[in-house]
Image (cartoon, rainbow, N blue to C red):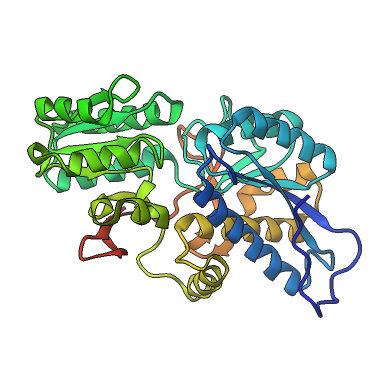
């Protein structure tokens, strides 16, 4: 079991801890770097809650479970954490995994505040047990589509792998772009290797290629193949799901990984709280924190406020979502019912399209905001 002890010298917290379960991808095939950033945010917020006296004098404790991007494993962890008596569930980065966790949390009556997953249909039926901080995929990817159109791209190829998440993304792009004169051409990366994909790409006359594929592979191989194919020198590569966000991308691709626009959920300028948290996260991670780390921090901040106001009773926590009003690192967090979304949704976290600056690949440029 993973717990974060209270800091030395803090004596205001005592008695039994209030426990929150945390689902995080910490081993492959999970996106480990995203999991580490998510966990850093969760842990930092828990430490700060305990430094400030805990939950009405009781320490807050994080019980962490590694999902390894496996939906069945995540669902089993939800069962286990419910039996361990956690008051609520936090976390998860991968949409398909979060969907399995949300279904099980709904079934067992465990409040789940989903930090990062964006799939619109996080549950099959509307539920009061689940709330979400990340913007829905339809909103983010429509903003990305607006960016493509404003940059002059109307023939867009997508290199896609089979998955509910990628299929959903391709459908959002197609439905949004078609009435606006755009065309989406799908390249099946289950059937094509990166070299064959380049040949197909030349034939499509597309001006943009979007990576709807896993990281690091096949994303890294696709980027290298396209960047080194003279026939495709003019094509823009994009990655709406955010593969270039993390340092490993720059390490693996160097200059080839720059100028690939992706979505991130940060405001133009951080508030004083956001700036303070950014400094603390940078120290904890020994690198610049991604938006995923801020999502982790905000998740615990919301749950701590709910626990202080409504206690650790699970039903009362679930009933409190519509009454939440918490200052997060990226704005005030309130949950509402949003058409087409089955869970309580923060509408909306700030959304940007950014890329790595070719002149300085460690620096991000904001290209578009929504």
Residue 6, picture quadrant: bottom right
Q: Position of residue 169 (x, y in %)?
A: 36, 32
Query: Measuring 54% from the left and 63% from the top, which residue is drawn there?
Result: 328
In this picture, residue 64 sits left or right of residue 31: right
Front residue of 321/278: it is 278
Query: Measuring 22% from the left and 38% from the top, which residue is drawn there?
Result: 225
Q: Is residue 351 above or below residue 69?
A: below
Q: How many marks?
A: 0
Residue 145, picture quadrant: top left
Q: Position of residue 61 (x, y in %)?
A: 77, 57
Q: Can residue 246 be seen in this snapshot?
A: no
Residue 236, picture quadrant: top left
In this picture, residue 177 sits left or right of residue 121: left
Query: Measuring 22% from the left and 54% from the top, which residue is drawn there?
Result: 259
Q: Position of residue 47 (x, y in %)?
A: 70, 67
Q: Position of residue 368 (x, y in %)?
A: 25, 55
Query: Which residue lies most toward the top here?
Result: 191
Query: Which residue lies most toward the bottom here?
Result: 9
Front residue of 369/364: it is 364
């Amino acid at each position: 079991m993973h717990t974060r002890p209270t800091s030395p010298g803090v004596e205001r917290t005592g008695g039994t801890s209030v426990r929150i379960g945390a689902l995080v991808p910490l081993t492959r095939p999970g996106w480990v770097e995203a999991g580490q950033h998510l966990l850093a945010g969760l842990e930092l917020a828990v430490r700060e809650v305990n430094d400030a006296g805990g939950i009405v004098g009781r320490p807050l404790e994080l019980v962490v479970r590694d999902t390894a991007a496996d939906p069945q494993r995540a669902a089993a962890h939800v069962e286990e954490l419910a039996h361990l008596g956690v008051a609520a569930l936090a976390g998860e980065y991968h949409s398909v995994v979060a969907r399995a966790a949300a279904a099980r949390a709904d079934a067992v009556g465990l409040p789940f505040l989903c930090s990062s997953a964006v799939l619109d249909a996080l549950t099959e039926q509307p539920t009061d047990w689940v709330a979400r901080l990340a913007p829905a995929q339809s909103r983010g990817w429509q903003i990305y589509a607006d960016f493509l159109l404003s940059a002059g791209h109307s023939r867009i190829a997508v290199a896609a792998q089979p998955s509910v998440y990628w299929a959903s993304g391709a459908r959002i792009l197609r439905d949004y772009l078609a009435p606006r004169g755009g065309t989406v051409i799908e390249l099946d990366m289950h059937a094509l290797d990166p070299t064959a994909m380049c040949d197909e790409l030349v034939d499509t006359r597309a001006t943009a290629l979007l990576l709807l594929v896993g990281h690091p592979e096949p994303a890294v191989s696709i980027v290298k193949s396209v960047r080194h194919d003279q026939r495709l020198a003019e094509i823009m590569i994009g990655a709406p799901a955010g593969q270039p966000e993390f340092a490993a991308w720059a390490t693996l691709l160097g200059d080839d990984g720059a100028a690939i626009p992706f979505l991130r959920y940060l405001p133009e300028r951080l508030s004083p709280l956001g700036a303070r948290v950014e400094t603390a996260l940078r120290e904890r991670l020994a690198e610049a924190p991604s938006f995923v780390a801020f999502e982790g921090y905000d998740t615990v901040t919301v749950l701590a406020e709910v626990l202080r106001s409504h206690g650790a009773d699970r039903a009362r926590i679930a009933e409190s979502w519509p009454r939440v009003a918490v200052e997060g690192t990226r704005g005030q967090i309130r949950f509402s019912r949003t058409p087409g979304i089955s869970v309580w949704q923060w509408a909306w976290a700030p959304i940007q399209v950014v890329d790595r600056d070719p002149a300085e690949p460690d620096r991000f440029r904001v290209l578009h905001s929504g």
